[in-house]
Amino acid sequence: MDSQDLQVLAAVRRWRAEGHRAALVTVAQTWGSAPRPAGAWMALRDDGRVQGSVSGGCIEDDMIARMLDGRIGGSQPFVLTYGVTREEANRFGLPCGGTLELVVEPAPDHALLTDLAARLEGGQLVRREVELASGQVRIFDACRGEALQWDGQRLSTIHGPHWRLLIIGAGQISRYLAQMAQALDYAVTICDPREEYSVEWDVPGAPLVAGMPDDVVMAMAPDPHSAIVALTHDPKLDDMALLEALKSPAFYVGALGSRVNNAARKARLLEYFDLSEGEVGRLHGPVGLHIGSRTPPEIAVSILAEMTAVKNGVSVARPEPANPASAGCGVR
């Protein structure tokens, strides 16, 4: 499943191949409540077709009108600002007086976009810089932790896998989780030493690495942009990953299992491994938000939803089931 950036790039390249002109629009800055974050992309074709989004829809309608009547033309990048006045905010559906500042590139360089797409498809993290005065666009290798920068004249955006996800186990849940995470710009890696599972792993862009889970976690060198999820449901494998992951600065560590199994796991980690109560307390288990999920794709949704909440600093309460003893390992 492609990320939003790759979907936009694919649309621009396809439209150009079909003989259409296409503009690229980037959210450079927001104030107040805004429907899309800084860095969001939208491609706009000469006949008004769009891919991506910079708002909830009303701004897109205005930009389509600008494209159709010729106000988006030439080759020089320029800035558009929406929502400066209360009337304009109401007109464009911006909540609570929100304001968007957009950088519009009427004729982005096709060769550079093709280069950028190739880098992203290869799992690279890339910085793209646009100089408004000269119209020059350049792309560079980027590092995790770099952020969008905008000073009114130069826009620097980061594209590619901003986050990393290590999944322990190459089962069915992992297949759905890997593809969903890729759509959110995670660089996904799988670890499963069990040959009966690993030989069947074939999710594009999510490599399976050899080795035991604890060694793979240490080799990963998790940082605050890393998540580790254990999904084998085999304590001999999951616990090996967790004893290293819980000591790391990874922002999210989770493990599959019922409440009863997870309580036993936490007790086991405290009793037999060199982990503190604080470290064991970081474990998200049962993994994922409680949304009543039972199928592998539903469980993957619940896991990624909880990861997203933690990443964004949102606290989500865990409701107790009516009968905790009957809660299955896959019910979220």
Image (tube, rainbow, N blue to C red):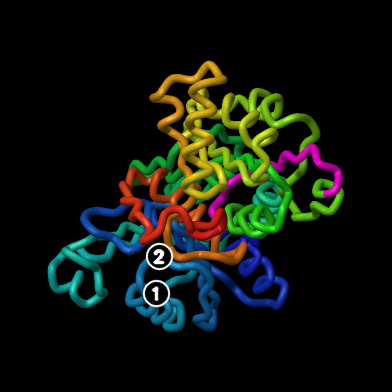
Magenta-drawn segment: 184-196
Assess disc 2: are there few (<14), some (14-19) or many (≥20) residues with their C-alpha within 10 Å of its C-alpha. Answer: many
Looking at marks 1 and 2 on the same chain, the residue that comes earlier in the sequence is marked by 2
Q: Find out whether the residues at labels 1 and 2 contact each other: C-beta distance under 8 Å.
A: yes
* Residue drawn where x is 70% and y is 58% of the image: 172
Residue 112 is situated, as x and y percent measured from the top left of the image, at 65, 52
Q: Which residue is mark 2?
A: 54
Mark 1 residue type: Glu
Mark 2 residue type: Val
Quarter of the figure with residue 10: bottom right
Above or below — where is 222 with respect to 110?
A: above
Q: Which residue is mark 1?
A: 60
Q: Is residue 205 visible?
A: yes
* Residue drawn where x is 60% and y is 64% of the image: 297
Quarter of the figure with residue 71: bottom left
Q: Is residue 265 left or right of residue 231?
A: left
* Residue drawn where x is 77% and y is 37% of the image: 209
Q: Which structural element holds mark 2?
A: loop
Residue 5 is situated, as x and y percent measured from the top left of the image, at 56, 57
In this view of the protein, which residue sits in the foreground, 140 or 97? Answer: 97
